[in-house]
Image (tube, helix red, strand yellow):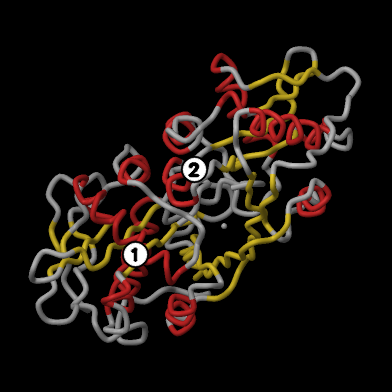
Amino acid sequence: MGRCAPTSGCSAGRSGTTPRATPSVCSSVAESGGRDVGGCLASDVVADFPTLPDGLTVRPLAADDVADASALLEAAEELDDTGEHWSPDDLTEWWVNDLVDLERDSLAVTSPDGGFVAWATVLALPTFRDAFRIILEARVHPAWRDRGIGCGLLAWQLERGREVHAERHPESPAVLSVEVYTSMSSLEGLVRRAGLEQERWYFVMERPLTDLPAVPAVEGVQLVPFSWDRDDEVRRAHNAAFTKHHGSADRDETTWRTLFTGQRAFRPELSSLALVDDAVVAYALAYVFEADTAANGYEQVDFGQIGVLPAARGRGLAKAIIATSLRAAAERGCRSAGLQVDSENVTGALRLYEGLGFTKRRTQVSWTRALPAVVSQ
């Protein structure tokens, strides 16, 4: 899981035909049939539930599972060390919205006594540029690991991901992606055995909010806080800024409202815009996650999206807006700042962030399986 919207091109915030999930991936998944889901948007039959150890119940996630899923993630964090903490409200934002069909694209696993054992989701945002990216997320409670549950869930996800591709964008190639922190050795082994390949490396970086960099003056540029009357202008600037970035896409209004500035964690007062002739040419969008604050004992500002329009690059605008937001966060009591960056970012963002005092704390690897187009255009 990640704090940025999947494949959003976050500067601060991831061959061959896939067969039906069979023992080549994992021996614990049904090979035929499919479960009927009446009233579905695309098709009424989706991948069978995986076969898991005796006594476990498999069903779709429900909106009221978020408290149990949050508790599971907190228990798993002691082993997985992702640095992320998800409250029930965070998971509600992530799962219960117009972009996710829980009935078709999720699983919950429970024990005979009703305990929450595991969950899995298949998430595909509606827009993309080169390949239709489908994100596979799951977590198994530490007490239930090494029993084949994760293997069964991944096999189901790979099959459901193939179906989502065929249903929604068969004319385009697709990529099934699992984001794995290097601290998650069990998950890394699982995706490797399933035949996924390492595609991209992302660095999670942090810095204390002390000895802050000066805000450079840029002639003809006005630095201002984010304002809601410019929200859609910032969305359009974000789309324009990331046209050449790996995995990026033009974000529509619904996605932007759901997973970007519409999040509870978004902090407009800590976000900065650069204006030229009263038009947005650069932006830094800031978030503070309450669950992280509760777990860590202090507030950290996380930069979810940072971008500069191509025509405005080379003038120091990224440094100016980040430095402005760092100072705003420090003034409001935040102790540290964080962001995530593609290690191969085409604009040299890694060097910029290192120059601003950010250092690498964690590494997240995007493991993928490429799917060719199902039908010719």
Residue 236 visible at all: no
| Mark 1 crowd level (few <14, some 14–19, many ≥20, 10 Å Cα) | some
The residue that label 1 is drawn on is: 75
Residue 293: x and y, percent? 48, 44
**Element under label 2?**
loop
Residue 220 relative to residue 287: left or right: right
User: Which x, y percent locates residue 110?
Assistant: 16, 66
- The residues tagged by marks 2 and 1 sit, at their Cα atoms, a distance apart of 34 Å
Q: In the rendering, which numbered label is found on residue 86?
A: none
**Above or below for 226 versus 369:** above
Q: How many marks?
A: 2
Which of pointers 2 and 1 lies earlier in the amino acid sequence? Answer: 1
Report the amino acid beneath label 1: Ala
Q: Nearer the viewer, residue 120 or 196?
A: 120
Q: Residues within 10 Å of mark 2 (few under 14, many from 20)?
A: some
| Horizontal side, residue 220 vs residue 374: left or right | right
Q: Residue at x 78, y 49 (%)?
A: 357
Which residue extends farthest front? 297
Reading the image, the residue beneath label 2 is: 127
Q: Quadrant of residue 18?
A: bottom left
- The answer to which quarter of the image holds residue 139 is bottom left
> Disc 1 on helix, strand or loop?
helix
- Screen quadrant of the N terminus: bottom left
Q: Where's residue 151, x and y in %?
A: 33, 79
Residue located 62% across and 40% down the image? 305
Amino acid residing under circle 2: Thr
